[in-house]
Structures are given as structure tokens and as C-alpha cells.
Image (cartoon, rainbow, N blue to C red):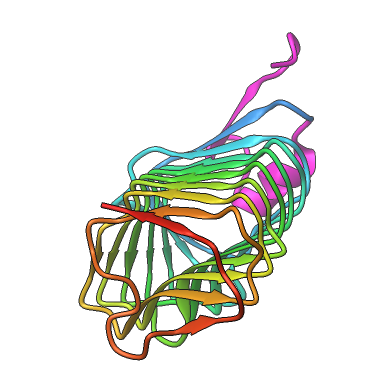
Amino acid sequence: MNADSRTITIPDDYGSIQEAIDNASEGDTIFVKRGVYVENPVVNKSVSLIGEDRDSTVIDVTAGLKVQSNNVTIAGFTIYDGYDGISLAANYCNISGNKITNTTHGIVVFGYENSISGNIFESIGLSSSIQLNFANRNLISGNYIVSCVEGIQIWQNTRNSSIPNPLHDLSDQTFLNDTDKRALITTPEKICSQQGLLHGSFTFSFKA
């Protein structure tokens, strides 16, 4: 962390999350107090975006929260009612302890060496709760996925690890499409509960 980094508090210092990001410096922490924030933040700096309380610090999105810079942390929010909950096009980021609900996609990842852990995905209505696209060496760990159309969707990736993510009440659980070898998936649930969506040629280790 930069020795000169500071903590910006919303809404005390700025009226919106985006205004705080625009005025932040690399390494700053943006602390968001309880409340409902109707906006689509674009995180284009290496900052930590921390909600005061997951269940009562709500970002009501339409397009979604976009992460476009490396080394970003997003934690402690409910993200609600958008196309993407979080779109992550960056590396070395940490997305943890959030709840994403009533969106079309949960988290969509384009990048490497990110950690997606301890999040709740509920009522993701059209596509995957977690989608990896050309995203290598990511850790997907301890997320709880319930009442969603799809669980974890993996496209054109290598060396990702998915280490137990409980999946409940889904149409499709894990979707692997044209994926490179060397993927490790561990889950207590069965894979692809209804449609058996395995496409391409695979050498995977599935562990309970």
C-alpha cells in the first residue's frame, strides 16, 4: 500500500461511489456506508472499494460495476438488478464477501490471477453466476450459488482452480466449453445436472 494512501468515506466526502473513484489516488480505500447507491461504478484505478455491511450497502446497477484496473478489491456489497453484477477486465483483483442478486450475469472475468471468494450468487436470471472468458490462473473459492440458471461457466481458460463452491437449485451447474487442459474443479455437487454441458476435448480432475 502507498504510504500516502487515504480512506475516502461515502457519502461523507463525496456523494457517489463514482465521484469518489474519480477523485481517488492509486492505493486509496473507498469506504461506503450503509445505503442504496443507484449507479454503475467504473473502477479504473487500483483502489479498495469496501462496503460497511454486505446486506445493507447496496449498489443498484443497470449495466453493472466494471473493474478496469489491476489490484482492485471489491468487498462488502449487495449488487442488485443489472445486466452484469461485476465485469472484471483486470488482473490481481480480489472480489470477496459480496452478494450479487437479480442480475443477468453474476461476475464475468477477463483476466488472470484474480480471486473470487466467499460471495453469494442468488437469482441470476439468464446466464452464469461466474463466467471465465480467456481468464487464466484464477481462484474461484467458497462461493455460494443458489436459485440461478447456471453456476460456473468456463470458456477458453487454463489453470483455473475452483475449490468448493456449493451449488443449489440450478438448471446447469458447471459449463465447460472449448477449455484448455489443466483445470481443477472441486465441488461437493454433481457437474452439469441436466444437460451434461461438456464441449471440446478435456483432461480434468474432478474432486469431491
Give 149 or 162, whichever is nearer the viewer.
Answer: 162
- Residue positioned 68% across, 69% down in the render: 156
Give 107 or 25, whichever is nearer the viewer.
Answer: 107
- Residue positioned 40% across, 50% down in the render: 98
Tell me where residue 60 appears, x and y as whole percent.
47, 68
Most extreme residue toward the bottom, as rendered?
A: 195
60 relative to 179 in the view: left or right: left
Tell me where residue 25 appears, x and y as whole percent.
79, 30
Most extreme residue toward the top, as rendered?
A: 3
Q: Quadrant of residue 206?
A: bottom left
Tell me where residue 57 appears, x and y as whole percent.
38, 50
Count of number-bearing discs:
0
Up the image or down, 46 lies above or below 159; here it is above
Magenta highlight on residue 18: yes
What segment is highlighted magenta in the picture? 1-25
Tell me where residue 97 appears, x and y as whole percent.
38, 44
Q: In which quarter of the image is residue 62?
A: bottom right
Q: Quadrant of residue 21?
A: top right
- Residue positioned 69% across, 16% down in the render: 1
Give 129 or 30, whichever is nearer the viewer.
Answer: 129
Magenta highlight on residue 129: no
Up the image or down, 208 lies above or below 155; here it is above
Up the image or down, 157 lies above or below 151; here it is above
56 relative to 26 in the view: left or right: left
